Amino acid sequence: MLRLPRFELLSPRTVRDAAAMLRDSPGSMLVAGGTDLFPKMKRRQQQPPIVISLGRIPDLRGVARADDGLHIRAMTTLTALASDASLDGPYRALREAAASISTPQLRNAGTIGGNLCLDTRCNWYDQSLFWRQAMGYCMKTHADVVCRVATSSPRCLATASADTVPALLALDARVHVTGPDGDREIALADMYREDGIHYMTLARHDVVTGVSVPDRAGWVSTYVKLRDRLAFDFPIAGVAIALKLNGGVVEDARIAVTGLGSRASLVPAAAESLTGKTLDEATVSAAAAATQRASRPMDNTAGTMAARRITVKVMTERALRQLTSNN
């Protein structure tokens, strides 16, 4: 049995206090549902001496709807999103993404804020301490060694695997962040960088408090993913698509992919290939081909790189046909 290392647990009552604790406690980490952090602590991938829980901070749960769109607080569980029928239609991609994450038990504990901050994954990194001691550490945990999946790489190639991120990218979401000195709002796309270790652009004392999605009236969306086990698993590849349709013509489009690089990313060329056109077979094929061309899978998860590139094309086609048949 893997056991947690010793740590001190702090339970602030305000977000500002949590941010101050992060700033003033070197090596400390936040925990929301704990479905990612605690297993990693058991495997000694992360060993914070202080863990700061957001569980007792009021007003960090729930989904609110307003004229300007959707507002989701950071401690809202994935189960709450997956079971919210009002998220169908324009926001369906988010509901499908939340429903595709792990198992019911973990969705009950996991939160939207935690999923947005999910650590990157790698076949080498995500092993037990015993395995990594025997086979050798990688640069994600030890700065003086190489990337084990690409020994000549100057950076860590661990892969982004948060399912809600591509869905929210396709929905043009913005993230609300609180630090010791105040609140701010950033585009979700600006929260990540292409680096398996330093994959987030936020400061270490920043706390994600929620995410907002603009009003998507007239839009439809969906999310599809490839994974090893259909019942539960991280994405080997994922595609999220949001379309604004008018009489069968695509007025606007956003396509995002995940599971291929160290960050989920939009595919502008694929979106541009759809704009102003009807979703006939030629248009669907062109968009799928553009998504495939933009995909650069890394060899650090299940499945070959070539197969995952083909999968991205197939999933894009299926998602577009699904959106066409449902509207």
Image: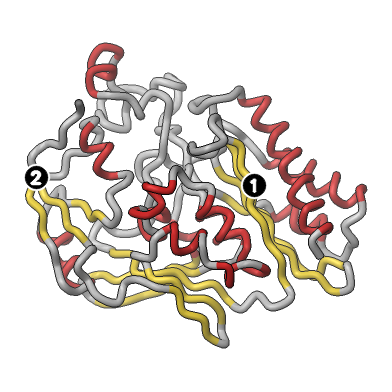
Q: Would residue 197 be found to the left or right of residue 89 on screen? A: left
Amino acid type, mark 1:
Val
Q: Residue at x 81, y 65 (%)?
A: 327
Up the image or down, 100 lies above or below 129; here it is: below
Could you say which is closer to the camera, residue 222 or residue 271?
222
Residue extending furthest bottom? 67
Q: Position of residue 29 (x, y in %)?
A: 21, 52
Q: Quick one: quadrant of the N terminus?
A: top left
Q: Position of residue 57 (x, y in %)?
A: 22, 71
Report the residue marked by disc 2. 7
Badge 2: residue crowd in 10 Å (few <14, some 14–19, many ≥20)? few
Instruction: Place residue 274 in its image quadrant.
Output: bottom right
Q: Position of residue 30 (x, y in %)?
A: 23, 55
Up the image or down, 267 lies above or below 146; here it is: below
Amino acid type, mark 2:
Phe
Pick whichever of labels 1 and 2 is earlier in the sequence: 2
Badge 1: residue crowd in 10 Å (few <14, some 14–19, many ≥20)? many
Label 1 and label 2: CA atoms lie apart by: 38 Å
Residue 57, visible in the rendered structure: yes
Secondary structure under the numbered disc 1 in the rendered image: strand
Residue extending furthest top? 134
Q: Would residue 221 be found to the left or right of residue 68 on screen? A: right
Could you say which is closer to the camera, residue 263 or residue 18?
18
Instruction: Place residue 288 in its image quadrant.
Output: top right
Report the residue marked by disc 1. 224
